Amino acid sequence: MTPLFLSSGLFLGWSLGANDTANIFGTAVATRMVRFSVAATIASVFVILGGVLGGAGAAETLGVLGSVNALAGAFTVAFSAAVIITWMTRLGLPVSTSQAIVGAIIGWNIFTGSPTDTNILSVIVSSWVFSVLLAAFFSLVIFKISKFFLDRAKVHILRIDHYNRLLLIAVGAFGAYSLGANNIANVMGVFIPVQIFSDSTYFGFLTITGTQKLFFLGGLAISAGVFTYAHRVISTVGSEIYKLTPITALIVVFSHSLVLFLFSSQWVEYQLISLGLPSIPLVPVSSSQVIVGGIIGISLAKVGGRGINLRVLGKIALGWVATPAIALVFSLVSLFIVQNVFEQNVAQQERYELNPAVLARMQVAQLPAGHLERLSGQRYHGSEDFRQQLLAVHPWKERELFQIFLYAKIDLIQITNERLQSLAAARHFSPSEQEALKKLSGRVFTHRWQFEEALAQASPLWALKEDTKKNKPWNEQLLKKREKAFAIFARTFWE
């Protein structure tokens, strides 16, 4: 069933390629500076590279919003988003794949009773708004700078045209890379928790992760969408919102590419942190919104906003508002059908327990654990049942529910000699880190946070650093190592 379930992610990738290629090469093709066949080839190659090499950052953020833990559920969520995007594409609207997948994931959270991390959701939503403003700002500033130099340069117009054509191709390649890095999370991110592919090592040193394999397939699907169905939206973005010249088309695409790159680059994030500057969150932003923001910036720079086709812009804005809401509802309906008609499990039944250790951990996190003392010692099978019991004793906020679920979830972790012997072969941990793990030999942990706290006590190498902003690179690498250690020692429900 795996290829069948994975097909919805490929469908979503195809939809993204059909819709969002316009954001990379729409202006260049519409101004006839680049042929569509050339644009499609460049976009296909670089979107795959971006997804495989740079897609991890945004995918991690999306995974926190909702961890879809069953293959049938991941299929349904991706299918719901793909249907909405395809429908909008047929209407010629450059809608947001990011908003569609976020709406579908929240639909899964609601259907299964899983809490939504409202902090992450607010970061994602605010980033959608900020990315549009940032693109408009970049376009306006770059246009002013370009105009200053071009007015003083003594270059023949034909040579300028030639340079502009080459730059459109180069910037388009950069844009395709940035699109892959930022938006591959929308295509395949929901399949990461179910671990379809395993890591592979070649030549003794080259490791291709299961996530990279997944992103490669997603990149191929995006490429298929580019070649087969991208013409319609290219027309809308490239010529109907605002009439662009070849030079302004170059500026718009460059601004769009910069914004997507900033919201997906871990390197840029670390550099900003090291300089003591505010970092940009690594979240999947709307490529469609960003390109429109860039076009608006050009219009503001040239004629103060006059000349924008408000009717077309209004249709696009309506799609932005409607997309997440429609995707959420469609996801709910689809999940019900898949589970009750086709009898497929769209979510693994997690187990939860409110014991004294969990209540004590909640108090450390400044959660009012006293409300839950009457539930202490009880176990719950399934997120929906656990959620109902929690809300029956206190009107928790969604953010508080998310923390309680995190602490109460049962993850049986057993440190056995057999699995300790596999550490050297895993090649994920240094000798000192392995020694810390060996200190826990024979111990059993009910909750994952207990395992992580015990590791931190065994060695400072396993402890998160307190200044989370300054030490974010260290902490992120440590979280990945913790994830690998958990995968080695965790026992499943059936074991």
Image (cartoon, grey):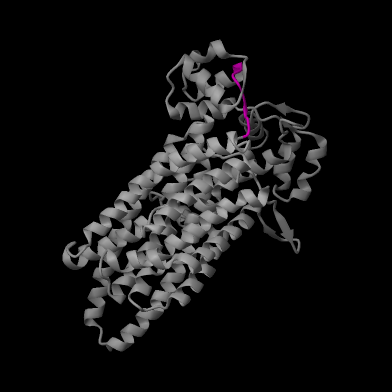
Which residue occupies the foreground of this view, 420 or 28? 28
At 57% across and 58% down in the image, what residue appears? 218
- Decide if residue 244 is in sight here: yes
**In the displayed structure, does residue 28 sit left or right of residue 194?**
left
Q: Residue 166 at x, y = what percent?
A: 41, 80
Seen from the viewer's position, the closer of residues 419 and 277 is: 419
Dividing the picture into quadrants, the one containing residue 461 is top right
Taking the magenta stretch, the answer to whether it contains residue 236 is no
Q: Position of residue 61 (x, y in %)?
A: 49, 45
Q: Where is residue 256 in the image (x, y as percent from the top left)?
A: 37, 62
The outermost residue toward the front is 341
Residue at 26 percent of width and 71 percent of height: 145
Q: Is residue 352 magenta?
A: yes
- Over which residues does the magenta segment extend? 348-356
Note whether 76 is above or below 269 in the view shown: above
**Residue 61 visible to an observer of this rendering:** no
